[in-house]
Amino acid sequence: MSLDSIPPEGAAEAAISRVLAAESGAKKTVAQAAQDADELDERSRAQARALAERTERRIRAVRGAFEAHVGAEIAAIEGQASASDASQPLSPEDSLRLERALSSLAAELTGDAS
């Protein structure tokens, strides 16, 4: 049936019905789009939280491994230093220099300038 065969009052009512139907469909489409956007937003936030948590765990693991490595290196260096100090007694010249330096320091600290 064409609009020419519909009386003018009926054509207006048919047009209004089509507009109202289109408006209703558009409202449903907009509501669905808003719901889809909210769901996408929540999924994105959840993914961002999960990524932040994984990153924090990895940073803690790297930091822990680094601290353990540095601790082991420091212990090794201290061990070498202790072994080196214990195995090399002072020479007579070094002992004399140390004695003079200590005497000079003691004099300076006590105010004895002799």
Image (spheres, grey):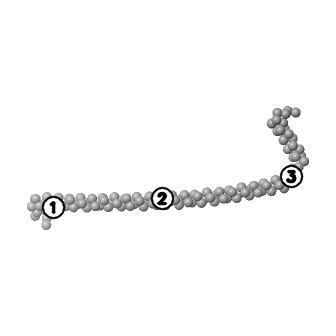
Q: In which quarter of the image is residue 73?
A: bottom right
Q: Is the N terminus in the top left, top right, bottom left or bottom right quadrant?
A: bottom left
Q: Label 1 amino acid?
A: Ala
The numbered disc on residue 89 is 3
Q: Say which residue appears at 78% left-offset and 54% top-offset.
A: 81
Name the foreground residue: 38 vs 8: 38
Mark 2 and mark 3: Cα distance apart in space: 60 Å
**Residue 88: percent from left, percent from top:** 85, 53
Q: Is the C terminus in the top left, top right, bottom left or bottom right quadrant?
A: top right
Q: Which callout, 1 or 2, points at the residue further toward the start of the chain? A: 1
Q: Label 3 amino acid?
A: Pro
Q: In this rendering, would 21 be left or right of 59?
A: left
Density class for disc 3 (Cα within 10 Å; few <14, some 14-19, many ≥20) is few
Q: Is residue 41 visible?
A: yes
Q: Which callout, 2 or 3, points at the residue further toward the start of the chain? A: 2
Q: Is mark 1 on a helix, strand or loop?
A: helix
Q: Mark 1 points at which residue?
A: 14
Mark 1 and mark 2: Cα distance apart in space: 52 Å
CB atoms at circles 3 and 1 under 8 Å apart? no
Density class for disc 2 (Cα within 10 Å; few <14, some 14-19, many ≥20) is few
